[in-house]
Amino acid sequence: MSNKFNQAMHKMGTEAFNEVADHLQSYITEEKRDYPNTTVRRKGVGITGRMAGSPRDVVDTGELRDSYKVSDESSNNKVRIRVEWTADHAGYVYSGHGDVPAYPWVNLGLRDIDWQELFRRKFNEVK
């Protein structure tokens, strides 16, 4: 295969997975989470003391949202994009703890992506 083809495929894959990563982050920043309780937000610009009901975003202090990282670890014509949330409490939010239910935002986000449409659109963009 030509180098030009490999470059086009790498670009397509990288752009597609960056779009997926942003979609997953939306499960933290948008009001998509059903939550059984009303709680008071602890911290944040203009939201301290605000009541959070359901559906809600999972942003309280902003630490989880801000810990979102996307890195391109591609090599040898293989596309590899790492998406991670590095906040200490990311695992607790994802898996749940005590009386706080799990919110596996990655699984939820991956389920509602139309993968065929995504790659068709990205392929047409790099033609």
Image: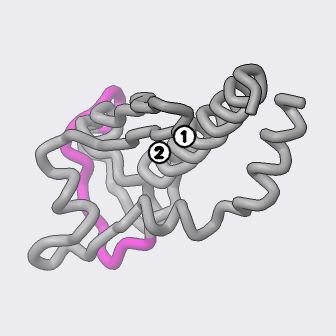
The Cα–Cα distance between marks 1 and 2, rounded to whole angstroms, is 5 Å
Between 31 and 79, the residue placed more toward the observer is 79
Magenta region includes residue 44: yes
Q: Main secondary structure of the magenta part?
A: loop
The vertical placement of 99 against 66, above or below, is below
> Circle 1 — which element?
helix
Q: Residue at x 48, y 54 (%)?
A: 27
Q: Residue at x 24, y 54 (%)?
A: 40
Q: Is residue 43 left or right of residue 29?
A: left
Q: Residue at x 57, y 42 (%)?
A: 17
What numbered label is drawn on residue 38? none
Q: How many marks?
A: 2
Name the image colouring: one colour
> Circle 2 — which element?
helix
Dots 1, 2 in contact, CB < 8 A: yes
Say which amino acid is labelled 1. Asp
* Residue 31 location (% of width, % of height): 51, 56
Say which amino acid is labelled 2. Gln
| Residue located beneath label 2 in the image | 25
The vertical placement of 9 against 25, above or below, is above
* Residue 24 location (% of width, % of height): 50, 50
Between 61 and 121, the residue placed more toward the observer is 121
Residue at the farthest front position: 1
| Residue located beneath label 1 in the image | 22
Number of other residues with Cα within 10 Å of mark 1, as a class: few under 14, some 14 to 19, many 20 or more: some
Q: Is residue 93 left or right of residue 98?
A: right
Question: Which quadrant does the N terminus fall into?
Answer: top right
The vertical placement of 3 against 80, above or below, is above
Q: The magenta stretch spans which residues?
A: 34-47
